Image (cartoon, helix red, strand yellow):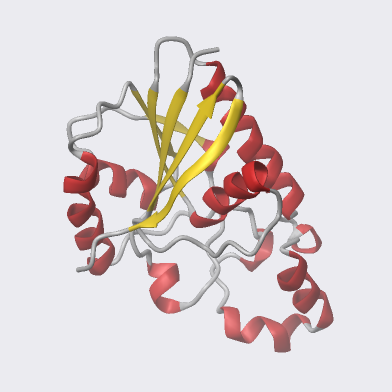
Amino acid sequence: MTDKILYFVRHGEAESNANHFFAGQADVPLTALGIEQAKATAPLLAHIPFDKVFCSDLQRAKSTAALALPDHKCEYTAEIREISVGELAFQKIDLCAAKYGEVFLNARKNVDYSAFGGESYEELMARAQGFLDRVAALEDTPVVGAFCHGGLIRAAAHCVLGKCAIGMPDNCAIAKFACKDGKWTLCKWNVTVEI
């Protein structure tokens, strides 16, 4: 198992972020600001000699990767999608408490959307850990990128650090992870460009 550096990049601002509705694994585009954020992230990534780049197969991540790292081909995968929120997708967040009551409040508190046909946080963490294991096992790819989603990136941090009070990364934030002798560490968190 070779040592690895893994750079996670969260997608730029999406329509769901700007308009405060659930997206989860629904396919929503970037906003104009999200496009500018992705373009502004390009100089932060330009010097990194990526051997392989993964990308969520959702539009907001794919658009971010194309703008922030235009000269690299990506391997698209559902493995690093955002947590599924099931039937909550496209619903306004601030209206869901009145509509669903205690079931929704518990889902938000516990980050467990299984009552709505979505995923639990444990399922998201299992996907994140599976991806970390996959990257660690890659041959001849010491530097890897992954364009994906805030929830997945935070879950990866929790896999490495244990559940702790680490916040959601900002749009287009970069997180740097390193794997040495099969053990992952978090090196940098929430690196962004002011635009």
Count of residue discs: 0
Q: Does 105 appear above or below 70?
A: below
Horizontal side of 162 relative to 65 (left or right) equals: right
Image spot of residue 70 (x, y percent): 19, 37
Looking at the rendered image, the quarter that the C terminus falls into is bottom left
Image side of residue 131 versus residue 60, left or right:
right
Whether residue 104 is visible, yes or no, is yes
Residue 166 percent location from the top left of the image: 58, 61
Position in image of residue 45 (x %, y %): 24, 41
* Residue 193 % position (x, y): 24, 61
Q: Choose top left, top right, bottom left or bottom right for residue 14.
A: bottom left
Front in this rendered view, residue 80 or 116: 80
Identify which residue is drawn at 28% across, 63% down.
34
The residue lying at 79 percent from left, 84 percent from top is 101
Q: Quadrant of residue 31?
A: bottom left
Picture layout, residue 29 above or below residue 127: below
Q: Please, which residue is most extreme toward the bottom here?
A: 98
Answer left or right for 44 relative to 174: left
- Determine whether, in the image, residue 62 is placed left or right of residue 36: right
Figure quadrant of residue 72: top left
Give the residue displayed 71% in from the left and 39% down from the top: 126
Camera-side residue of 1 and 82: 1
Confirm whether residue 119 shows in the render. no
